[in-house]
Image (tube, grey):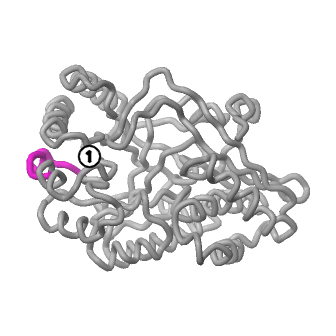
């Protein structure tokens, strides 16, 4: 079965209620969806995490001509070939993000060709559902008092929905961030997990200042406290605070994660499957993390395709340490405004008793709504 056509779909949609993380305000949601069509019309779907207008030409102008006409089932071989074609110029960033989307689509194709879900092709599952934490709690306004009240209200909503944990955006000002964290912990109680994420908005001094202030609050992890390039800063901070340090959203392939793990820089790795190299590479990263005794909780920020991809991976992630009460990987379940996250899949993912079920249909186990895809499609 040969690859016949590769298409990309650039999706955009404005949001009526902008929100901010430490780096910028978000006014629209964007995505790049990858469609790989094989002979006979079988279709595999993937998604790239990254700037879609830049990723689109990498796929269409460079990678696609290298894949069309070749065996649609030879995904691992294609991964090695494409990575090496750009290895001198693209060991991370756009080249790997584009490769990740194609890799996911090829896994979806293989699953459909075999009539099996991806996690079965991988030899699983280890679990049939994933516990989910709510990603939200972004800044809503520059009015600190009003913003804190809105955050508390949002956090209480997640607790009422049955989430076992949630993640707060920090990285603005250590004092204000600490006050927001304290207010949310008081509102949701001690029985619900609370993590914080600075999106590398701090230097080492401010990151430590916040960590010291919120240590008594039982924080699950402190995500991206400093710049992703500052591996020494990660390691230094990990030695200064009892809060587990997490990172890896902006890291790529097993080679980046080998450096993080070898340096003892993180307690939790968070590759984004749609950016770090796809399912093929994230299985390798998972093996490295497991050998190092480090927890793996995938970063997820995308449509239902990205969610499905993460769920199949989570179905195969071993616990960092086995036992009757082994710590399971979490699914990051984005709850921020997103007009097409659920719209492009015919059966959106739902939280049930704090968990999200792993799809059981062939491939990714999802069906794409082509009408919705066309509705949100934007020309480059």
In percent of width and height, residue 24 lies at: 39, 38
How many tags in the picture? 1
Who's the residue at 57% across and 69% down the image?
90
In percent of width and height, residue 216 lies at: 8, 48
In percent of width and height, residue 172 lies at: 24, 40
Residue 29 magenta: no
Disc 1 on helix, strand or loop? strand
| Res 80 → quadrant | bottom right
Q: Furthest-right residue in view?
A: 40
Q: Is residue 1 visible?
A: no
Report which residue position mark 1 lands on. Answer: 196
Give the residues in magenta: 211-220
Quarter holding the C terminus is top right
Relative height, residue 268 to residue 380 (above, below): below
In percent of width and height, residue 73 lies at: 77, 69
Crowdedness near tag 1: few (<14), some (14–19) or many (≥20) residues, C-alpha within 10 Å: many
| Res 318 → quadrant | bottom left
Q: Is residue 137 visible?
A: yes
Who's the residue at 34% across and 34% down the image?
138
Q: Main secondary structure of the magenta part?
A: helix
Relative height, residue 125 to residue 288 (above, below): above
Q: Is residue 132 left or right of residue 293?
A: right
């Amino acid at each position: 079965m040969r690859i016949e056509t590769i298409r990309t779909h650039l999706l955009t949609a404005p949001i009526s209620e902008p929100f901010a993380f430490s780096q910028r305000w978000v006014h629209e949601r964007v995505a790049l969806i990858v469609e790989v069509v094989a002979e006979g019309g079988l279709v595999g779907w993937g998604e790239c995490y990254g700037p879609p207008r830049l990723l689109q030409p990498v796929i269409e102008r460079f990678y696609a001509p290298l894949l069309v006409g070749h065996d649609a089932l030879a995904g691992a071989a294609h991964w090695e070939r494409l990575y090496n074609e750009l290895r001198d110029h693209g060991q991370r960033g756009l080249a790997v993000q584009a490769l990740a989307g194609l890799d996911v689509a090829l896994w979806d194709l293989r699953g459909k060709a075999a009539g099996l879900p991806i996690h079965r092709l991988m030899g699983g599952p280890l679990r049939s559902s994933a516990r989910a934490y709510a990603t939200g709690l972004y800044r809503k306004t520059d009015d600190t008092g009003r913003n804190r009240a809105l955050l508390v209200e949002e956090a209480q909503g997640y607790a009422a929905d049955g989430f076992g944990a949630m993640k707060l955006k920090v990285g603005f000002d250590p004092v204000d961030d600490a006050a927001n964290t304290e207010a949310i912990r008081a509102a949701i109680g001690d029985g619900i997990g609370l993590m914080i994420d600075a999106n590398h908005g701090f230097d080492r001094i401010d990151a430590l200042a916040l960590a010291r202030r919120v240590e008594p609050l039982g924080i699950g992890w402190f995500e991206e406290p400093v710049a992703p390039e500052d591996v020494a800063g990660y390691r230094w901070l990990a030695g200064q605070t009892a809060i587990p340090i997490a990172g890896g959203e902006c890291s790529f392939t097993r080679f980046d994660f080998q450096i993080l793990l070898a340096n003892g820089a993180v307690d939790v790795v968070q590759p984004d499957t749609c950016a770090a190299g796809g399912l093929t590479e994230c299985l390798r990263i998972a093996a490295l993390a497991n050998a190092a005794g480090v927890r793996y909780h995938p970063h997820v920020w995308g449509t239902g395709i990205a969610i499905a991809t993460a769920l199949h991976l989570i179905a195969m992630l071993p616990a960092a340490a086995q036992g009757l009460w082994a710590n399971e990987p979490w699914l990051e379940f984005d709850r921020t405004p997103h007009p097409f996250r659920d719209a492009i899949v015919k059966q959106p993912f739902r939280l049930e008793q704090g968990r999200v079920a792993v799809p059981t249909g062939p491939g990714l186990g999802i069906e794409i709504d082509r009408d919705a895809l066309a509705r949100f499609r934007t020309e480059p």
